[in-house]
Amino acid sequence: MKIRKLKLHGFNNLTKTLSFNIYDICYAREEEERKKYLQYIDEKYSAEGLTQILQKVADMIGAKILNVAQQDYEPQGASVTILIAEEQIQNERQDVVAHMDKSHITVHTYPEMHPQDGICTFRADIDVSTCGEISPLKALNFLLQCFEAEIVILDYRVRGFTRDVNGKKIFIDHRINSIQNYIDPVIRNKYNMIDVNVYQENIFHTKMVIKEEVSDLAKYLFGGINKQIMTREQKKIRHLLRQEIYEIFNGRNLPAIKD
């Protein structure tokens, strides 16, 4: 069903923000493997590579890029910020200032590891914030595919208000009751999900955790399984991975889970 376009008085001032916290978990047995893991992450998710992803996001949601800032960090990690606008800019300097705190796409990466157990966790924080009619939800599935992960925490919020031609305030210009409605069924079926939504505040929160967990250990071992990892050690590694996923998904340290 086609939704009738709102007739507004002036510019659409609604700000729509989609935020991701994405976690990828793996196990690196030896110190040398852990160093290689960090090197691999830094190369795969370098500032240049992340910029290419975010530029595709801007094109996907129909936004015009005003400015790109990118940075690789030592010893690891990267950040990219892209300022965007809904329409082509005529007077760039003035419009960059106007859009700086409203329309932007950012990503920050945080590779890290457990100092003793060999668990490695890569986290990417992504914000897609738009002002006007363009919607960050259009890039939702693309970003989920780009950052295949064990855990995804999503927040979507609509802020502010705009007015129609009669002066009536409009606090949201589209229908939504869950972020899950916008996730492709193929992706959705890979995860268990829970929602915490505050409808009267236009706040939507979805947490996703991979269904298959760690039964296929080869997917979680950096460098793959080798003959030196015996059955007993594999059981220990699975337990460590499950505990890591369990705690990150719940957002706190928890008692050891039982096998």
Image: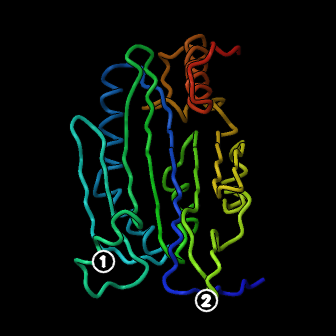
Q: Position of residue 100 (x, y in %)?
A: 33, 66
Residue at 67% x, 72% y is 174
Is the residue marked by circle 2 packed among few (<14), some (14-19), or many (20+) residues within 10 Å?
A: few
For this rendering, which residue is in front, 63 or 45? 63
Placement of 34 over or under 48, stated as above or below: above
For this rendering, which residue is in front, 229 or 241? 241
Residue at 55% x, 32% y is 218
Residue at 31% x, 56% y is 80
Furthest residue toward right: 1
Q: Amino acid at mark 2?
A: Val
Is the residue marked by circle 1 packed among few (<14), some (14-19), or many (20+) residues within 10 Å?
A: some
Look at mark 2 in the image and give the residue it sits on.
165
Q: In the rendered structure, are the residues bearing label 1 and label 2 in contact, judged by CB atoms less than 8 Å apart?
A: no
Q: On the rendered image, what quadrant is the N terminus found in?
A: bottom right
What secondary structure is found at the residue carrying circle 2? loop
Furthest residue toward top: 232
Q: Amino acid at mark 1?
A: Asp
Look at mark 1 in the image and give the residue it sits on.
95
Residue at 43% x, 45% y is 124
For this rendering, which residue is in front, 235 or 89? 89
Q: Is residue 1 left or right of residue 144?
A: right
Q: Earlier in the sequence, mark 1 or mark 2?
A: 1
Marks 1 and 2, Cα distance to the nearest angstrom?
A: 25 Å
Furthest residue toward front: 167
Specify the quadrant of the image occupied by residue 77: top left
